[in-house]
Amino acid sequence: MFKEFIQGLSITFKHLLPGHSTTVEYPAVKLKPSDRFRGLHRLVPAHDREKCVACYLCPTVCPAKCITVDSAENSKGEKYPRTYQIDLLRCIFCGYCVEACPVEALEMTGEYELANYTRADFTFTKERLLK
Ligand code: SF4
Ligand code: SF4
């Protein structure tokens, strides 16, 4: 019993030593999320346009139904999203949309600072997602 008590105390005191802290002084210090972190989405650009071919797979698989796509055809007969938007207030960051995309036109970045002031700021349009 006493041995376990000492072991517990030694773990606690070890975390007080410099370099052993598990927290950072955010926002002065920012952690780099892992490569597998699912943060803000990004539409991947391709040459003079977005890579997305407006196939509607991502809004179909999205469990939160927060993706809206409106397709159109350009002069070459290629489909593209005239509008594409994600409502981040409903998104649960599951990543199904990225997995479903057949042309890898959508990815999730390490961006996690998503706080905002108005509901409209949480609607990410095609233009914002391409940035
Ligand atoms: S991460 Fe999940 S909830 Fe968010 S838009 Fe993609 S499929 Fe929908
Ligand atoms: S699944 Fe990919 S190509 Fe299809 S609409 Fe979504 S982002 Fe565009």
Image (cartoon, rainbow, N blue to C red):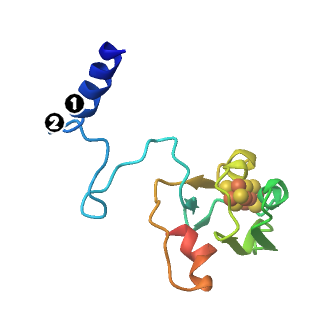
Residue 79, percent across and down? 78, 66
Left or right of 70? Residue 122 is left
Residue extending furthest front? 2
Image vertical order of residue 4 relative to residue 90, above or below: above
Q: Which residue is mark 2?
A: 17
Residue extending furthest left? 18
Q: Secondary structure at mark 2?
A: loop
Left or right of 10? Residue 122 is right
Amino acid type shown at disc 2: Leu
Crowding near pointer 1: few (<14 within 10 Å), some, many (20+)?
few
Image vertical order of residue 88 relative to residue 34, above or below: below
Which disc, if any, is residue 14?
A: 1
For the point 72% across and 53% down, the residue is 97
Residue 34, percent across and down? 44, 42
Q: Is residue 52 visible?
A: no
Quadrant of residue 30 within the rendered picture: bottom left
Residue extending furthest right? 60
Residue 51, percent across and down? 64, 59
Label 1, label 2: how many angstroms apart (C-alpha)? 6 Å
Amino acid type shown at disc 1: Lys
For the point 85% across and 58% down, the residue is 60
For the point 74% across and 68% down, the residue is 80
Residue 12, percent across and down? 27, 33
In front: 61, or 76? Answer: 61
Labels 1 and 2 touching (C-beta < 8 A): yes
